[in-house]
Image (cartoon, rainbow, N blue to C red):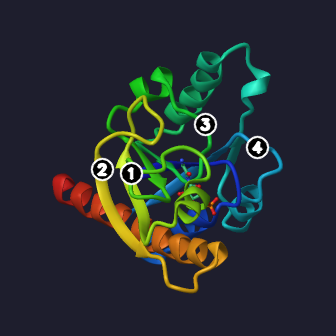
Amino acid sequence: MRVAVFASGSGSNFEAIAKSDELRNLGLEIELLVCDQPQAHVLKRAEKYHIPVFVNRLADYPDRNDYEQAIVDKLKTLKIEYVLLAGYMKVVTKTLLGAYPNRIINIHPSLLPKFSGLEAIERAFAAGDEVTGVTIHYIDEGVDTGPVIKQCKVVRLRNDTEANLEARIHQTEHQMYRQVILDLLNKNNEVAK
Ligand code: GAR
């Protein structure tokens, strides 16, 4: 299964996927990292795993359609089958969605539909929610919306700081993303039999 991972920042989710021998052995091929931030730490992680990168800035295009079309052209050249968003902080619009219908997966650090958008962990913590979590879903044209694949709860402990809670949410994300991809690989491998 040929995938591209999209990320804008640190890339801990990207690395959790890239370092998994289990996923690779089941047929996961990360052909490309797409990144919209030339200074993002995720680029260093890609180098470590020898994964090619496509750094593509919205500001370098006349509009969002041209920006996404450049990405689609690259993905099609590499015969990418699935797109995995892993901290990609841009809204995805028709151009990309039309090229990959039901094949773009996103991870978000809250129990959607609560706290969609930016700074989800901070907002859940500030709201004092006792239970928050992580959602993995297929995307549609909204912000962090679309059919849910998997949701897991993360409980806020009595003495939790925001940093502790965030660390546990990230741990949960890494396990969940690997599991969702594993399920997808198993499903695809079944169909191919
Ligand atoms: C993750 O918590 C991910 O769920 C979130 O960005 C973080 C990226 O962390 N995504 C969104 O908020 C999408 N709306 P990472 O760069 O360490 O993987």
**Is the residue 85 above or below the residue 101 in the image?**
below
Secondary structure found at label 4: loop
Cα separation, mark 4 vs mark 3, equals 11 Å
Establish if 183 lies above or below 59: below
Query: Percent position (x, y) of residue 165?
Result: 56, 75
> Can you identify the residue that label 1 sits on?
112
Q: Give above or below for 129 relative to 100.
A: below
User: Which mark sits nearer the N-terminus, 3 or 2?
Assistant: 3
Taking the spot 22% from the left edge, 58% from the top edge, the residue there is 187
Check disc 1 and give the amino acid type: Leu
- Asked if marks 1 and 4 touch (Cβ < 8 Å), the reply is no
| Mark 2: few/some/many CA within 10 Å (<14, 14-19, 20+) | some
* Label 4 sits on residue: 37
N-term mark: 3 or 1: 3
Instruction: State the SS at label 2.
Output: strand
At label 2, the amino acid type is Val
**Where does the image place residue 94, in percent across and percent down from the top left?**
46, 21
The residue identified by callout 2 is: 148
Which is nearer the eye, 163 or 78? Answer: 163
- Between 38 and 93, the one nearer to me in the picture: 93
Indicate the amino acid at tag 4. Gln
